[in-house]
Image: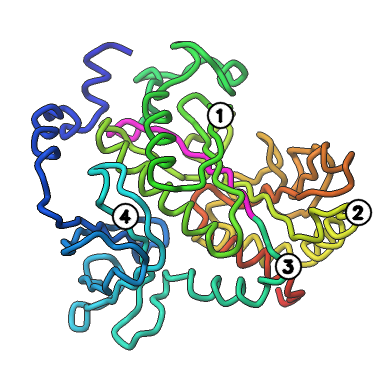
């Protein structure tokens, strides 16, 4: 890719002088604190934010007041009745303007104080509360693809394709990976913020990456993954590129993008837990259609482009499970099979899934024993 092509593929705002910006960020705040409220918009995929000044540093989530916004501009309300409520639920350190400033994830309530349609956290939290004695742990593997501002995969030839898949997964070298600066910045920013990020790696398709969040217990999983997504989008702003969670951003012989869900209960993690893992998989096998519907924001339509039975996926119409099988719906890691305890991996969730919907579905099926399809 030529220098001109690179310049054309990044956003204009990324070319602003960041050194000039730094001199203002160093100014004292006289004890005031900036709190950035983050919420999920009406698409169920997009994130929005706005910032409020507090007179002192909040120590707990209870120190952060409710706020409101115009829901008619976020696909969440009509203009004639557009005020929506922001309810703070989880606080993080702000890796962009640093301590004592905060990021706060919020639930969205409608004018009548009922959850907005895109607020899937509310029912997820109810399910987690019912299942709390089982101590459900989750770890989500968030895949994403870096695109230029022209929506072409970042680093790919402008009028062609890179070489076939094979050398890119966990690759090293300028001809193998594109965008590592973004990945490393995101990792450090998540650690600073307090996100439970546990790893990262280059993926099978060039310009595709993955980071892992967890283990997290209960509702914490969705909170941490959403803030990790927000931080990624903000970092991509600085670099002038786009992170997409589209499950199949490039058609053809290229891997799609998922959000594999690793799941266990306390019983599964203890000696002899393989029995409980197998029981949970049996329950999942009888509820395949339900899980497919909630594993992407379009009721399975997005995943239908990805779950084809090729490129390390199962077929969307069939349920399967196996040890160390990345072509199955459910994979039992080989080490778990040897130890007879641990966790399993549900490989069906799409990269653009709502983690609240995914974790709620796993709990309702595997712990609360719900059976409706």
Residue 152, placed above or below residue 53: above
Disc with the residue nearer the chain's start (2 vs 3): 3
Disc with the residue nearer the chain's start (3 vs 4): 4
Q: Distance between the residues labelled 2 and 4?
A: 41 Å
Disc with the residue nearer the chain's start (1 vs 3): 3
Q: Distance between the residues labelled 1 and 2?
A: 33 Å
Mark 2, secondary structure of its residue? loop
Residue 287 spot, x, y in % from top left: 74, 67
Locate residue 159: give its quadrant. Answer: top left
* Mark in the foreground, 1 or 4: 4
**Residue at image coords 38%, 70%:** 107
Q: Mark 3 = which residue?
A: 134
Q: Mark 2 = which residue?
A: 272
Mark 3, secondary structure of its residue? helix
Disc with the residue nearer the chain's start (1 vs 4): 4
Residue 32, placed above or below residue 80: above
Residue 44 relative to residue 84: left or right: right
Q: Mark 1 = which residue?
A: 203
* Mark in the foreground, 1 or 2: 2
Q: Give the range drawn in magenta.
A: 138-151
Residue 175 spot, x, y in % from top left: 46, 11
Q: Is residue 67 magenta?
A: no
Disc with the residue nearer the chain's start (1 vs 2): 1
Residue 201 relative to residue 334: left or right: left
Q: Distance between the residues labelled 1 and 3?
A: 33 Å
Q: Mark 4 = which residue?
A: 103
């Amino acid at each position: 890719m030529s220098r001109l092509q690179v310049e054309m593929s990044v956003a204009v705002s990324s070319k602003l002088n960041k050194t000039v910006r730094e001199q203002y960020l160093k100014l004292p705040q006289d004890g005031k604190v900036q709190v950035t409220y983050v919420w999920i918009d009406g698409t169920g995929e997009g994130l929005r934010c706005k910032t409020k000044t507090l007179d002192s540093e909040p120590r707990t989530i209870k120190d952060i007041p409710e706020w409101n916004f115009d829901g008619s501009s976020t696909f969440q309300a009509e203009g004639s009745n557009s005020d929506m409520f922001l309810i703070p639920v989880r606080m993080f350190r702000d890796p962009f303007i640093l301590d004592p400033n905060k990021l706060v994830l919020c639930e969205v309530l409608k004018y009548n104080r009922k959850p907005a349609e895109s607020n899937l956290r509310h029912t997820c939290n109810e399910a987690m509360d019912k299942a709390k004695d089982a101590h459900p742990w989750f770890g989500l593997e968030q895949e994403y693809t870096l695109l230029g501002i022209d929506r072409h995969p970042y680093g790919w030839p402008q009028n062609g394709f890179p070489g076939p898949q094979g050398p890119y997964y966990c690759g090293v070298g300028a001809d193998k990976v594109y965008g590592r600066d973004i990945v490393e910045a995101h990792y450090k920013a998540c650690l600073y913020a307090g996100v439970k990020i546990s790893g990262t790696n280059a993926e099978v398709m060039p310009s595709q990456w993955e980071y892992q969040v967890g283990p997290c217990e209960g509702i914490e999983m969705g909170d941490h993954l959403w803030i990790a997504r927000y931080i990624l989008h903000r970092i991509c702003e600085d670099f002038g590129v786009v992170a997409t969670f589209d499950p199949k951003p490039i058609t053809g012989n290229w891997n799609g993008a998922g959000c594999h869900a690793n799941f266990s209960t306390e019983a599964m993690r203890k000696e002899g837990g393989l029995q409980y893992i197998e029981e949970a998989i049996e329950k999942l096998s009888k509820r395949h259609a339900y899980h497919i519907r909630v594993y992407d924001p379009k009721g399975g339509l997005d995943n239908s482009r990805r779950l084809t039975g090729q490129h390390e996926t199962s077929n969307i119409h069939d349920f399967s499970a196996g040890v160390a099988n990345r072509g199955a719906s459910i994979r039992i890691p080989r080490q778990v099979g040897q130890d007879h305890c641990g966790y399993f991996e549900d490989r069906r969730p799409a990269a653009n899934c709502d983690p609240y919907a995914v974790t709620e579905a796993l709990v309702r099926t595997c712990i609360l024993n719900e059976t409706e399809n």
